[in-house]
Amino acid sequence: MDWDKVIMFNMADTSHIIPPRHPFVKAIVDGLSHECDVLPKSKCLIAVSGGADSVALLLGMNVIAQRRKWQLQLVVGHVQHHLRPEAETDAQFCEQLANQLDLPFERRDIAIDQTQGNVEDTARQLRYDALIDMAKQHQCTSIVTAHHGLDQLETMLMRLIRGTSLRGLGAMPWTRSLTDDITLIRPMLKTDHAMAVDLLQSIKQTWCEDQTNMDTTRLRATLRQRVIPQMLELRGDLSQQMTQTADQLRLIQAMLDEQCVDAIQACKTRHDASKELARYSRKQLRQLHPAMMQMVLREILTQAGIRPDRLSAKQLSQFGKMLLDQDGSERQLIRSRHVSVLLNRDTLTCLRT
């Protein structure tokens, strides 16, 4: 990268260059106010990779932070994954951008063994660990990421392709608690990549390109390059529509979660045996709607200590059929190293083993 061309103007003047009512900025303000519940004078760590989306987020947040209504304190955070040859150039770009904006800059370098497991999942987990560490260091209450509407659409499509539940279709929420004191927020979900690029081009600001985004051997990149453009031809505001759909699905899931808690309490029976974790009335479980029965069974088994990845929809459906059949003999539904779940004529019992 030609470093002389990276910073094309004095970023300290950004607030005077970006129109205060630019659609991208307005969308972020709406997200901060109505979806992320960010309070004035909050301290926020902005996760910046150097890509167009995160650079636009940083510049937009910098404009918003200086408004009297907000008075936000921003810190720029960058995670160097050391997975691409140009990654160090990206890190230096982010640091220079933070310096030009006169904002604190924090960097974390992480090492990933590319021969072990899912590299993307490992990188994601280590990245969030690093961002949390930076946020704690600067006493930030929020970590702000540049996920936008098309990212939401990609996530929903990926989960549909792989198979998912209602909860999975809710995709990325606007906020997610990371620790007792730190919340992940995504105020850009009502924007898309084109809006971010439009903002940057309007002020002649460059950004870094991640070439792995073009690697169509990866499912997300294939969707981004080949599938979503055709979907957008059918409906240009598809990302906004999918964000609204995901919001509705999460509301429905939250309602069902409340009903699930109530159903579990209604099905639970008194017990005294020291080895028992919990006992539930088979009669009460049988009266539940089949969909709620599966939710309740999943929650009961998870609370007992069964790993969620052992509880497929097919397996839960099988357990539901066992609850409904007329067999009154004692049967073992599932067993792990520490827990055994037994079903008899009257009860479903979770035991320590």
Image (spheres, helix red, strand yellow):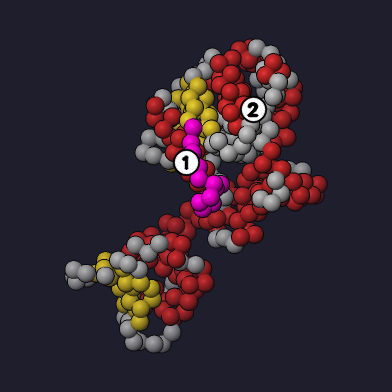
Instruction: Decide: is 292 above or below 142.
Output: below
Q: Quadrant of the C terminus?
A: bottom left
Q: Nearer the viewer, mark 2 or mark 1?
A: 1
Q: Quadrant of the N terminus?
A: top right
Query: Which residue is at the far right?
Result: 233
Where is residue 318 shown, x and y percent of the image?
Answer: 48, 76
Residue at the spot 74% in from the left edge and 24% down from the top edge: 201
Please give the count of numbered marks on the rendered protein: 2
- Secondary element under disc 2, as helix, strand or loop, is helix
Residue named by callout 2? 56
Residue at the spot 73% in from the left edge and 20% down from the top edge: 204
- Secondary element under disc 1, as helix, strand or loop, is helix
State left or right for residue 233 relative to residue 109: right
Q: Which residues are magenta?
A: 109-121
Q: Earlier in the sequence, mark 2 or mark 1?
A: 2
**Which disc number belongs to residue 126?**
1
Where is residue 151 shown, x and y percent of the image?
Answer: 64, 43
Where is residue 190 shown, x and y percent of the image?
Answer: 64, 38
Instruction: Decide: is 339 above or below 99.
Output: below
Three-letter amino acid code of the residue under disc 2: Ala
Is residue 97 visible to us here? yes
